[in-house]
Amino acid sequence: MSYGANNADAFRQAGVYAGRILKGAKPADLPVVRSPKFELVINAETAGILDLNVASSLSAIADEVIEQPGSLLCKLLHLLGSPLGTPRLSGHVPIHGEY
């Protein structure tokens, strides 16, 4: 799950800044602009592999719910038997090198 600024908007704004600088504006004089749109993305497949339940109300308001199988992270977690799921769900914080 991630919540953050829309990447397309951030890249567009970077282009606007670059254009202003190339036209002679001083970077220190340019205002800081915050992204107007934030996105909530949920990877339902990874949540399932980690035995996490995502509330349907949260899925309903998400901008994107990834359900397609085949992501590299999901394949690795599946092959490894989800070693990261058990310690974190039990409240145990892994010590360096411990799973």
Image (cartoon, grey):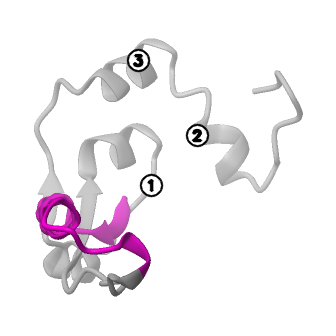
Which kind of residue does numbered mark 3 sit on?
Leu
Magenta stretch holds residue 96: no
Which kind of residue does numbered mark 2 sit on?
Gly
Q: Which residue shows up at 65% across the image and 52% down it?
A: 89
Mark 2 — residue?
85
| Residue 72 visible in the picture | yes
Q: Main secondary structure of the magenta part?
A: helix
Quarter of the image for the C terminus: give it: top right
Q: Residue furthest right?
A: 95
Mark 1 — residue?
52
Magenta stretch holds residue 3: yes
- Tell me where residue 37 sits by quadrant: bottom left
Q: Position of residue 13 (x, y in %)?
A: 17, 69
Instruction: Name the foreground residue: 19 vs 53.
Output: 19
Kindly indicate whether the residue at mark 2 contacts the one at mark 1 (C-beta within 8 angstroms).
Answer: yes
Which kind of residue does numbered mark 1 sit on?
Leu
Task: Report the magenta residues as a range.
Answer: 1-28
SS type, badge 2: helix
- Tell me where residue 76 sits by quadrant: top left
SS type, badge 1: loop
Quarter of the image for the N terminus: give it: bottom left
